[in-house]
């Protein structure tokens, strides 16, 4: 459904969005996964298209979401697949918005047949670290493989603890990741996962800090796209 109030301020801008969660196979029937619904990334992709962008959506697993209209959706399973798809499409993007929940770890090997229960206690599953796709994109931009103007947006679900609050951790993550914008979801009881509402902050590498008021994921998406529209360079083709 297209709202007439939606601005066409991303006309012709090429946007790459990642969404959903990756699944890392343990054996033919089991995987390591996460609770990402994909709603935030899909809302971003849908709204960016409504605002005139040409959108590629690299999607992991979602809570059964339909592909957004007028968006080129590519489905992937694992973090390694997602990296490949992102690397393939990154050079053609003016803005890259990484909303996916990428599994940090994968089993070092995938058993070719189903692991049997057996009589004793199970073996531990050895894990390897997945590549950080966002960090790779930022590195490519620094190395000149990607255009220096490419706007890169990361996401973080953060909790506070006795050593720091959500914002302190989020600022540190923004600096560590080297992206231009970090969308921070405050997570805790009933927040961010599997719910329709979100709250958090939008932090800019330029030091800007904008509270994202409690509201729907589409409202959050429109705030994020406002910030992208401000930063994106339009003259390229
Ligand atoms: N991300 C990524 N590749 C990974 C892990 C994360 O591209 N292997 C991206 C996510 O899509 C998100 C951002 O990095 O945009 C932050 O993810 P997050 O899980 O918060 O950061 P991590 O560096 O994995 O730190 P941690 O999970 O330990 O908090
Ligand atoms: Ca992580």
Image (cartoon, rainbow, N blue to C red):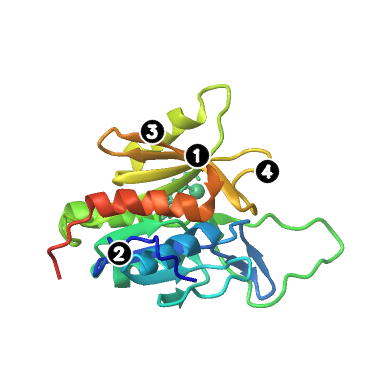
Q: Which residue is mark 1?
A: 213
Examine the rendering and report whether any part of residue 26 can be seen: yes
Q: Residue at x 61, y 53 (%)?
A: 196
Name which quarter of the figure residue 150 lies in. bottom left
The secondary element bearing badge 4 is classed as: loop
Where in the figure is residue 99, as x and y percent of width and height? 45, 56
- Number of marks: 4
Where in the figure is residue 103, as x and y percent of width and height? 53, 56
Q: Which residue is mark 4?
A: 190
Q: Is residue 214 left or right of residue 229?
A: right
Q: Residue furthest left?
A: 235
Q: Residue at x 42, y 45 (%)?
A: 183
The residues bearing labels 2 and 4 have C-alpha atoms spaced at a distance of 34 Å
Of badges 3 and 1, nearer the viewer stands 1
What quarter of the picture does the C terminus occupy?
A: bottom left
Q: Which residue is mark 3?
A: 171
Q: Earlier in the sequence, mark 2 or mark 1?
A: 2
Q: Which residue is mark 2?
A: 8
């Amino acid at each position: 459904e297209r709202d007439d109030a939606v601005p066409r301020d991303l006309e012709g801008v090429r946007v790459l969005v990642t969404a959903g969660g990756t699944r890392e196979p343990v054996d033919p029937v089991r995987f390591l996964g996460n609770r990402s619904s994909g709603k935030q990334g899909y809302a971003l992709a849908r709204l960016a298209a409504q605002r005139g962008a040409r959108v590629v959506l690299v999607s992991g697993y979602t809570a059964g979401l339909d592909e957004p209209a007028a968006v080129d959706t590519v489905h992937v399973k694992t973090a390694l697949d997602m990296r490949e798809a992102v690397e393939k499409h990154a050079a053609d993007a003016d803005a890259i918005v990484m909303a996916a929940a990428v599994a940090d770890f994968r089993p070092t090997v995938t058993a070719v047949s189903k692991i049997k229960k057996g009589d004793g206690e199970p073996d531990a599953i050895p894990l390897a670290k997945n590549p950080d796709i966002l960090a790779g994109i930022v590195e490519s931009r620094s190395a000149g493989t990607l255009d220096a103007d490419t706007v890169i947006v990361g996401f973080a679900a953060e909790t506070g603890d006795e050593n720091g609050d959500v914002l302190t951790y989020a600022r540190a993550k923004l600096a560590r990741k080297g992206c231009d914008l970090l969308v921070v979801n405050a997570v805790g009881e009933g927040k961010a996962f599997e719910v329709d509402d979100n709250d958090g902050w939008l932090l800019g590498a330029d030091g800007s800090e904008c509270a994202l008021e409690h509201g729907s994921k589409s409202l959050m998406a429109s705030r994020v796209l406002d910030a992208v529209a401000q930063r994106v360079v339009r003259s390229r083709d």
